[in-house]
Image (cartoon, helix red, strand yellow):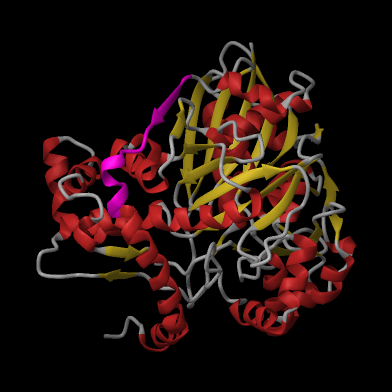
């Protein structure tokens, strides 16, 4: 039997899944690594720690391929990472993740002087410090020694594949997320390169998402248990693959994913620019451009509420042998839709879409003596959904009303949360049986690369049956009144985000 591994290099962990060529899962592995935040706005990871996690994950799942061999490994990865390499391909920096905001000053300058919108129209990257375009300006101006010493600039996926094979390539979807790729030509953009002061030779060779090659180094093939002729398939970004993996291939079919972060996305046939620059637009493959909005604050906000507000309940859940997050859902379900007028803005880690403000901060609004922690957890869940809905409103302006909404991610296993989405969006929410959407799509791209599949639409045959959540008309009135308040508040509070963020940077410390 032949196997394909879909591997996703995420922000907090790397996940590997072992598939047979019929799309059945035979093994899973998940290996975590730390995020380094030594200074305010820093969010870095050690590229070699991540590489070692991929070795461990691949080793674990390959060990389950007892009656055959792995013929291909297909790659998904987090977007917007940046690593400086010297002439010998040794890292000069850790990997700056999408959450690193140290280039905020330069993004703000580009937004204010209009050059940011000009670059957005060329590259499809919104003006935000997540983008490697702005990270490069940070290095150029604040760490010139590293900037001048760097022979190459790469993302985490390119570094890992180079370390396995000695081949330095970057596929189109990942390159698009750098802000250095012209979204119309799908080539490195001369204007962007000139702006940041680097040359084409410092960037990887551009290839298609289905590009494949052989040549894993023998030392890693032996340790992992792979054949030396295994194919490496470049794959795509986690965002592109999550969209493909739920079957949202057609324009107007929205894919919503909530993991640690979250996003709303759809495919279009040609580049589209949002006049308000709220949405990205990235080429993925011929005739397929991904347009949408990424959100910093998805499941990570629920994790915060779980740990900060419900510590005692976690102990009770252990004693009762139930999942503590399921317990939170049960608690939230005791409160009516709309949380009796309690609104939560979930901007605990700044925000990308739709605000594009690294200074954004979270808040509860409307608190009164009636409200309990049960109201707070319901408001947290609803606040994340309101934020996703606000991105969907922006997407509707650019691409039209959605034809269907497909959803995936860990949240989809919560009946309460998924029903909440249907009620807030006033739309059917379709949940595919295969919730490992990114890894499934990586596997499918490998099959396309190997000539086993030729039509992207055919991924739907691997997705299993669908569950449909229908909106409850009885709660429409509650959400219809609250959502405009949520949106107005986000605009009003935005005037003070920089002030409170600056205060926190100045006075929040560990000395007291």
Report x, y in % for residue 430. Answer: 46, 32
Using the image, determine if residue 192 lies above or below residue 340: below
Q: Does residue 309 appear anywhere in the picture?
A: no
Give, as a single range, the part of the protein colored magenta: 465-478
Report x, y in % for residue 378. Answer: 25, 53
Q: Quadrant of residue 130?
A: bottom right
Instruction: Choose between 121 and 16: the one closer to the eye.
Output: 121
Give the quadrant of the C terminus.
bottom left
Give the quadrant of the N terminus.
top right
203 sits to left or right of 444: right
Using the image, determine if residue 417 lies above or below residue 66: below
Residue in the image at 63% along x and 54% along y: 79
Q: Does residue 113 appear anywhere in the picture?
A: yes
Using the image, determine if residue 55 lies above or below residue 182: above
Residue 410 lies in the magenta-colored region: no
Instruction: Choose between 455 and 230: the one closer to the eye.
Output: 455
Report x, y in % for residue 475. Answer: 27, 46
Q: How many marks?
A: 0
492 sits to left or right of 248: left
Using the image, determine if residue 222 lies above or below residue 363: above
Report x, y in % for residue 501. Answer: 43, 81
Instruction: Choose between 201 and 266: the one closer to the eye.
Output: 266
Instruction: Choose between 149 and 363: the one closer to the eye.
Output: 363
Residue in the image at 74% along x and 79% along y: 140
Residue in the image at 54% along x and 18% along y: 24
477 sits to left or right of 55: left
């Amino acid at each position: 039997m032949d196997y394909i591994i879909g591997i996703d290099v995420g922000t907090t962990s790397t996940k590997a899944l072992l598939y047979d060529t019929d799309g059945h899962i035979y093994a899973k592995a998940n290996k975590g690594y730390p995020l380094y935040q030594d200074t305010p706005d820093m969010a870095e990871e050690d590229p070699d720690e991540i590489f070692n996690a991929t070795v461990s994950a691949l080793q674990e799942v390959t060990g389950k391929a007892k009656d055959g061999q792995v013929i291909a490994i297909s790659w998904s990865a987090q977007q917007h990472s940046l690593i400086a390499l010297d002439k010998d391909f040794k890292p000069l920096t850790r990997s700056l993740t999408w959450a690193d905001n140290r280039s905020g000053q330069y993004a703000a300058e580009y937004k204010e002087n209009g050059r940011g919108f000009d670059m957005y129209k060329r590259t499809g990257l919104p003006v935000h410090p997540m983008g490697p375009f702005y990270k490069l300006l940070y290095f150029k101006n604040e760490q010139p020694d590293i900037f001048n010493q760097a022979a190459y600039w790469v993302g985490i996926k390119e570094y890992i594949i180079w370390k396995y094979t000695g081949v330095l390539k970057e596929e189109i979807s990942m390159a698009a997320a750098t802000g250095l790729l012209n979204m119309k030509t799908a080539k490195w953009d001369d204007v962007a390169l000139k702006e940041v002061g680097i040359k084409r030779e410092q960037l990887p060779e551009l290839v298609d998402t289905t590009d494949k090659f052989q040549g894993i180094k023998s030392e890693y093939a032996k340790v992992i248990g792979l054949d030396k002729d295994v194919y490496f398939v470049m794959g795509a970004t986690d965002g592109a693959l999550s969209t493909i993996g739920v079957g949202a291939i057609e324009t107007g079919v929205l894919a919503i994913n909530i993991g640690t972060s979250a996003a709303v996305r759809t495919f279009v046939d040609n580049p589209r620019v949002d006049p308000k620059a709220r949405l990205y637009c990235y080429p993925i493959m011929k005739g397929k451009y991904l347009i949408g909005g990424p959100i910093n604050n998805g499941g990570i906000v629920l994790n915060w509420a779980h740990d900060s507000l419900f510590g005692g309940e976690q102990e009770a859940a252990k004693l009762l042998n139930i999942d503590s997050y399921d317990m939170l859902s049960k608690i939230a379900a005791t409160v009516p839709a709309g949380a009796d007028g309690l609104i939560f803005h979930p901007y605990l880690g700044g925000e990308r879409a739709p605000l594009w403000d690294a200074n954004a901060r979270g808040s509860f609004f409307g608190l009164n003596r009636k409200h309990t922690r049960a109201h707070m957890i319901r408001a947290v869940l609803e606040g994340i959904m309101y934020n996703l809905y606000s991105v969907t409103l922006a997407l509707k302006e650019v691409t039209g009303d959605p034809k269907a909404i497909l959803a995936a991610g860990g949240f989809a296993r919560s009946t309460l949360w998924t029903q909440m989405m249907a009620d807030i969006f006033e739309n059917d929410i379709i949940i595919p049986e295969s919730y490992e959407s990114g890894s499934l799509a990586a596997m499918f791209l490998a099959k396309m690369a190997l000539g086993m599949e030729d039509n992207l639409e055919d991924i739907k045959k691997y997705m299993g049956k669908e569950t449909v959540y229908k909106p409850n008309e009885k709660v429409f009135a509650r959400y219809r009144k609250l959502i405009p308040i949520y949106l107005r508040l986000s605009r009003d509070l935005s005037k003070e985000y920089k002030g409170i963020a600056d205060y926190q940077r100045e006075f929040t410390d560990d000395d007291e």
